[in-house]
Image (cartoon, grey):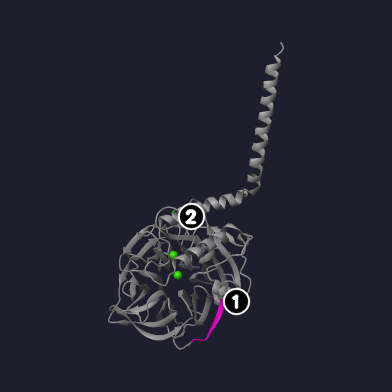
Amino acid sequence: MHSSPELKSKSLWLALLVGVLAFALVSMTAPAKLSSPDKSDDQSEKKEDKEKKKKSKSDDDDDDDDDDDDDDDKQKKKEAAKQSKKSDSKPVSTKSEKAEVQNSAPIVSLTVGSIDTVAATVETDPVPHGGDAADDPAIWIHPTDPAQSTIIGTNKQGGLAVYDLSGKQIQYLPDGMMDNVDLRDGFKLGGQTVSIVTAGNRKENSIAIYKVNPNTRMLENVAAHKIAHGLSIYGSCMYRSAKTGKIYYFGNSKSGDVEQWELFDSGGKVDAKKVRAFKLGSVVEGCVADDELGHFYISEEAVGIWKYGAEPDAGDKRAQVDKVGAGSLVADVEGLAIAYGRDGAGYLMASSQGNHSFVVYRRDGNNELVKKFRVGDGGGIDGAEETDGIDVTTANLGQAFPHGVFVAQDGLNDKGNQNFKLVPLQAIIKQ
Ligand code: CA
Ligand code: CA
Ligand code: CA
Ligand code: CA
């Protein structure tokens, strides 16, 4: 069988055409292949996309009602934070270009590899409001059955919730725009010794005060009256003096003002009197007091963490624990918490919101840096990102948390509104 010359030349042309097409195809795909990101980048981009979708769904501004929050600035900061999460080779840039200039030191280059990733084993029910709503947790330890302990969490859009250690909401109080919450045991009230819970109510600009009913585990309002701040309340925390046994409430403001109030029994209700005021240079919120060592720590969001004396006569002498930019923190610096160990040992923990991580320092001495970690996805529970408030206890909380628990607000919950993540403390700190 011989093909005709005409057919032969047709086949030749066809072969040539196929060759040319194949060459064109190869030259088109080759550069694309070269510039395509590697697998891990691809994954992180997918994750980023997921987060973006989530964000567009919810208003993720830290504060919806404040004029001093620049939306553009926030967006820039969040993009920078995402960038830092995505790439471990690029330096972390933050919103605080001001801090960058001031420190004139290289921006901290945290690498993903240098940060441990742990996972939550429990997450709470989401808060009832969408957008940026959940803010700060506090852990209440049941006096006789630690497994019955609770997590009290704020919903800054409208109230306060109580969760059991499985994350189930057991109480919700629509009492106002509660921003931060803290508690102290051992308050003498109406002849009883009770746990007192305080929260800064931004709706009324008042100090919300409750006691925990250990039988129901629920909160009961015990404020003697509406106690108004002398500032526009933002963050708050509490202190119990080892020296005097007195219990205090610290409230602060975006203006950098801090007030210390002494809480006292007034006919079976709790009243408060202002005993101290001082001022920092810019926006503050997260704070915590070390009851044993008498320190008061506060986060200046774009600057770092400061340590003051916690007694009302301590004045404004202070030391800087860590810095944004040159230190281990990426703005905003948010929640602070203390993990008490024996004999003054233990840790100060901080939320470094700008790079979705947490920083651990020693409680004693000059608060030496111990480690950094993230709460990542694991065991069917998503990680904690853009965390505002945190709390921690080293107490045995029963089977679920025999070595204590670390609680973090999650700004980007994968299913529904924001919530709180519970991480067994031994995953973070080997004891
Ligand atoms: Ca937030
Ligand atoms: Ca804040
Ligand atoms: Ca999350
Ligand atoms: Ca979730």
What residue is rendered at 46% in x and 65% in y? 72
Question: Residue tagged by mark 1?
Answer: 103
Residue 320 among those drawn in magenta: yes
Q: Is residue 388 left or right of residue 323?
A: left
Q: Amino acid at mark 1?
A: Asn
| Residue 419: x %, y % from top left | 42, 59
The answer to whether residue 235 is above or below residue 24 is below
CA–CA distance in space, label 2 to label 1: 31 Å
The answer to whether residue 55 is above or below residue 224 is above
| Residue 273: x %, y % from top left | 35, 84
| Residue 311: x %, y % from top left | 46, 85
What residue is rendered at 43% in x and 81% in y? 257
Which mark is first along the chain, 1 or 2? 2
Residue 10 badge: none
Question: Residue tagged by mark 2?
Answer: 51
- The answer to whether the residues at label 2 and label 1 have Cβ atoms under 8 Å apart is no
**How many dots with numbers?**
2
Q: Secondary structure at mark 2?
A: helix
Q: Amino acid at mark 2?
A: Glu
From which residue to which does the magenta span run? 316-321
Residue 133 among those drawn in magenta: no
Circle 2: is it few (<14), some (14-19), or many (20+) Cα within 10 Å? some
Query: What quarter of the picture does the C terminus occupy?
Result: bottom right
* Residue situated in front as seen by the camera: 99 or 398: 99
